[in-house]
Protein backbone atom coordinates (compact mmCIF):
# COMPACT_ATOMS: atom_id res chain seq x y z
CA UNK A 1 0.00 0.00 0.00
CA UNK A 2 1.17 3.51 -0.69
CA UNK A 3 2.69 5.33 2.31
CA UNK A 4 0.40 8.34 1.95
CA UNK A 5 -2.64 6.10 1.87
CA UNK A 6 -1.31 4.29 4.94
CA UNK A 7 -1.28 7.55 6.88
CA UNK A 8 -4.99 7.87 6.16
CA UNK A 9 -5.99 4.24 6.65
CA UNK A 10 -3.80 3.05 9.52
CA UNK A 11 -5.40 5.11 12.31
CA UNK A 12 -8.89 3.90 11.34
CA UNK A 13 -7.74 0.30 10.93
CA UNK A 14 -5.82 0.27 14.21
CA UNK A 15 -8.64 1.87 16.16
CA UNK A 16 -11.26 -0.44 14.70
CA UNK A 17 -9.13 -3.51 15.34
CA UNK A 18 -8.73 -2.36 18.94
CA UNK A 19 -12.50 -1.90 19.32
CA UNK A 20 -13.08 -5.35 17.81
CA UNK A 21 -10.56 -6.87 20.24
CA UNK A 22 -12.18 -5.13 23.20
CA UNK A 23 -15.55 -6.52 22.16
CA UNK A 24 -14.21 -9.99 21.29
CA UNK A 25 -15.38 -9.52 17.71
CA UNK A 26 -12.08 -9.81 15.87
CA UNK A 27 -12.83 -13.03 13.97
CA UNK A 28 -16.29 -11.78 13.08
CA UNK A 29 -14.97 -8.39 11.96
CA UNK A 30 -12.22 -10.00 9.88
CA UNK A 31 -14.75 -12.22 8.10
CA UNK A 32 -17.08 -9.25 7.57
CA UNK A 33 -14.18 -7.16 6.25
CA UNK A 34 -13.38 -9.81 3.67
CA UNK A 35 -17.02 -10.00 2.59
CA UNK A 36 -17.31 -6.24 2.37
CA UNK A 37 -14.09 -6.01 0.37
CA UNK A 38 -15.47 -8.58 -2.04
CA UNK A 39 -18.67 -6.57 -2.43
CA UNK A 40 -16.69 -3.34 -2.82
CA UNK A 41 -14.60 -4.93 -5.56
CA UNK A 42 -17.54 -6.49 -7.37
CA UNK A 43 -19.86 -3.51 -7.30
CA UNK A 44 -18.24 -0.49 -8.87
CA UNK A 45 -21.58 1.33 -8.66
CA UNK A 46 -21.59 0.96 -4.89
CA UNK A 47 -17.96 1.97 -4.37
CA UNK A 48 -18.26 4.88 -6.80
CA UNK A 49 -21.46 6.11 -5.14
CA UNK A 50 -19.82 5.98 -1.72
CA UNK A 51 -16.74 7.82 -2.98
CA UNK A 52 -18.80 10.43 -4.83
CA UNK A 53 -18.66 13.94 -3.40
CA UNK A 54 -22.08 14.59 -4.95
CA UNK A 55 -23.91 12.18 -2.66
CA UNK A 56 -24.69 13.78 0.72
CA UNK A 57 -23.01 12.31 3.80
CA UNK A 58 -26.37 11.66 5.47
CA UNK A 59 -27.58 9.84 2.36
CA UNK A 60 -24.46 7.69 2.33
CA UNK A 61 -24.94 6.86 6.00
CA UNK A 62 -28.58 5.96 5.41
CA UNK A 63 -27.60 3.68 2.52
CA UNK A 64 -24.88 2.04 4.60
CA UNK A 65 -27.31 1.51 7.46
CA UNK A 66 -29.97 0.05 5.17
CA UNK A 67 -27.57 -2.33 3.43
CA UNK A 68 -25.37 -3.39 6.33
CA UNK A 69 -27.19 -2.98 9.65
CA UNK A 70 -28.13 -6.67 9.75
CA UNK A 71 -24.94 -7.90 8.08
CA UNK A 72 -22.19 -6.44 10.25
CA UNK A 73 -21.49 -5.71 13.89
CA UNK A 74 -22.72 -2.38 15.28
CA UNK A 75 -19.11 -1.27 15.76
CA UNK A 76 -18.42 -2.03 12.09
CA UNK A 77 -21.44 0.02 11.07
CA UNK A 78 -20.12 2.83 13.27
CA UNK A 79 -16.81 2.68 11.41
CA UNK A 80 -18.62 2.99 8.08
CA UNK A 81 -20.61 5.97 9.34
CA UNK A 82 -17.48 7.59 10.77
CA UNK A 83 -15.71 7.18 7.43
CA UNK A 84 -18.74 8.73 5.72
CA UNK A 85 -18.80 11.63 8.20
CA UNK A 86 -15.13 12.31 7.64
CA UNK A 87 -15.50 11.98 3.87
CA UNK A 88 -13.21 8.95 3.90
CA UNK A 89 -15.71 6.27 2.89
CA UNK A 90 -14.09 6.19 -0.55
CA UNK A 91 -11.06 4.72 1.21
CA UNK A 92 -13.08 1.91 2.77
CA UNK A 93 -11.33 -0.78 0.76
CA UNK A 94 -7.91 0.57 1.75
CA UNK A 95 -8.95 0.82 5.42
CA UNK A 96 -10.20 -2.78 5.41
CA UNK A 97 -7.12 -4.03 3.55
CA UNK A 98 -4.98 -2.30 6.16
CA UNK A 99 -7.08 -3.79 8.96
CA UNK A 100 -6.55 -7.28 7.54
CA UNK A 101 -2.84 -6.56 7.14
CA UNK A 102 -2.58 -5.49 10.79
CA UNK A 103 -4.60 -8.52 11.87
CA UNK A 104 -2.23 -10.85 10.00
CA UNK A 105 0.83 -9.04 11.40
CA UNK A 106 -0.45 -9.35 14.98
CA UNK A 107 -1.06 -13.06 14.55
CA UNK A 108 1.98 -13.80 12.37
CA UNK A 109 -0.18 -14.98 9.49
CA UNK A 110 1.48 -14.99 6.09
CA UNK A 111 -0.71 -14.08 3.13
CA UNK A 112 -0.31 -16.28 0.08
CA UNK A 113 -1.98 -15.17 -3.12
CA UNK A 114 -2.66 -18.14 -5.37
CA UNK A 115 -3.61 -17.31 -8.94
CA UNK A 116 -4.76 -20.26 -11.00
CA UNK A 117 -6.05 -20.70 -14.52
CA UNK A 118 -9.29 -22.21 -13.20
CA UNK A 119 -11.00 -22.41 -9.82
CA UNK A 120 -9.29 -24.82 -7.47
CA UNK A 121 -11.20 -27.57 -5.70
CA UNK A 122 -10.63 -28.26 -2.00
CA UNK A 123 -8.10 -31.04 -2.63
CA UNK A 124 -6.05 -28.80 -4.92
CA UNK A 125 -6.21 -25.97 -2.38
CA UNK A 126 -5.02 -28.32 0.37
CA UNK A 127 -2.14 -29.56 -1.81
CA UNK A 128 -1.07 -26.02 -2.71
CA UNK A 129 -1.41 -24.98 0.93
CA UNK A 130 1.05 -27.74 1.95
CA UNK A 131 3.53 -26.62 -0.71
CA UNK A 132 3.21 -22.97 0.21
CA UNK A 133 3.59 -23.73 3.92
CA UNK A 134 6.92 -25.42 3.26
CA UNK A 135 8.11 -22.54 1.06
CA UNK A 136 6.90 -19.87 3.48
CA UNK A 137 8.30 -21.73 6.46
CA UNK A 138 5.08 -21.36 8.43
CA UNK A 139 1.84 -23.24 8.92
CA UNK A 140 0.09 -19.98 9.72
CA UNK A 141 -1.10 -19.06 6.24
CA UNK A 142 -4.07 -17.36 4.68
CA UNK A 143 -4.79 -18.22 1.06
CA UNK A 144 -6.13 -15.53 -1.23
CA UNK A 145 -7.44 -17.34 -4.31
CA UNK A 146 -7.70 -15.67 -7.71
CA UNK A 147 -8.48 -16.97 -11.17
CA UNK A 148 -6.66 -15.77 -14.30
CA UNK A 149 -7.46 -17.77 -17.46
CA UNK A 150 -4.40 -16.19 -19.13
CA UNK A 151 -2.24 -18.62 -17.16
CA UNK A 152 -3.59 -21.35 -19.49
CA UNK A 153 -2.98 -23.96 -16.78
CA UNK A 154 -1.26 -24.36 -13.44
CA UNK A 155 -0.86 -21.62 -10.85
CA UNK A 156 1.29 -18.81 -9.50
CA UNK A 157 1.79 -18.30 -5.77
CA UNK A 158 3.03 -15.08 -4.16
CA UNK A 159 4.08 -15.16 -0.51
CA UNK A 160 5.82 -11.98 0.52
CA UNK A 161 8.72 -11.60 -1.89
CA UNK A 162 8.68 -15.26 -2.94
CA UNK A 163 7.01 -16.40 -6.15
CA UNK A 164 6.25 -19.95 -7.23
CA UNK A 165 5.33 -19.94 -10.90
CA UNK A 166 3.92 -23.29 -11.97
CA UNK A 167 1.79 -21.86 -14.74
CA UNK A 168 1.63 -23.24 -18.23
CA UNK A 169 1.96 -19.75 -19.71
CA UNK A 170 5.35 -19.24 -18.04
CA UNK A 171 6.50 -22.68 -19.19
CA UNK A 172 5.51 -21.81 -22.75
CA UNK A 173 7.33 -18.49 -22.41
CA UNK A 174 10.48 -20.22 -21.10
CA UNK A 175 10.30 -22.76 -23.89
CA UNK A 176 9.98 -19.93 -26.41
CA UNK A 177 13.03 -18.20 -24.93
CA UNK A 178 15.01 -21.45 -25.01
CA UNK A 179 14.06 -22.04 -28.64
CA UNK A 180 15.00 -18.46 -29.52
CA UNK A 181 18.48 -19.02 -28.05
CA UNK A 182 18.94 -22.23 -30.05
CA UNK A 183 18.02 -20.74 -33.40
Image: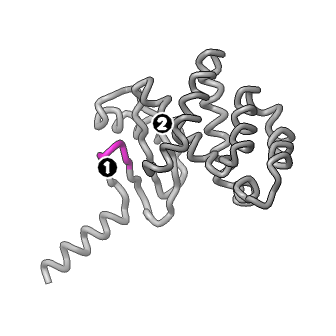
Where residue 30 appears, x then y in whole percent? Answer: 60, 30
138 in relation to 10, above or below: above
Is 35 in the magenta? no
Q: Which residue is mark 2?
A: 101
What secondary structure do most residues of the magenta stretch adopt? strand
Q: Is residue 46 left or right of residue 110?
A: right
Q: Which residue is mark 1?
A: 164
Where residue 124 appears, x then y in whole percent? Answer: 46, 42
Where residue 79 appears, x then y in whole percent? Answer: 69, 34
Q: Which residue is the extreme one toward the bottom? A: 183
The residue lying toward the viewer, choosing from 37 and 82, is 82
Residue at image location 82% in from the left, 53% down from the top:
56
Residue at image location 82% in from the left, 33% down from the top:
69
Residue range in magenta is 157-164
The residue lying toward the viewer, choosing from 84 and 121, is 84
Which quadrant of the structure image shows residue 77? top right
Looking at marks 1 and 2 on the same chain, the residue that comes earlier in the sequence is marked by 2
Distance CA(mark 1)–CA(mark 2): 22 Å
Is 158 in the magenta? yes
Count of marks placed on residues: 2
Of badges 1 and 2, nearer the viewer stands 2
Q: Is residue 119 left or right of residue 82?
A: left
Element at label 2: helix
Where residue 44 appears, x then y in whole percent? Answer: 70, 59
120 in relation to 153, above or below: above
Which quadrant of the structure image shows residue 131? top left
Element at label 1: strand
Residue at image location 49% in from the left, 37% down from the top:
123
The C terminus sits in image quarter: bottom left
Q: Is residue 78 left or right of residue 154?
A: right
Crowd rating for badge 2 (residues with CA inside 10 Å; few <14, some 14–19, many 20+): some
Amino acid sequence: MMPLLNTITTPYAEAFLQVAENRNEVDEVVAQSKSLLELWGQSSEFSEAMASPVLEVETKKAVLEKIFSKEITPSFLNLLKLLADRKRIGYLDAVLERLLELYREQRNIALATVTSATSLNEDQQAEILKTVQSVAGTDNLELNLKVDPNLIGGFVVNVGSKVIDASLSSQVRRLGLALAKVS
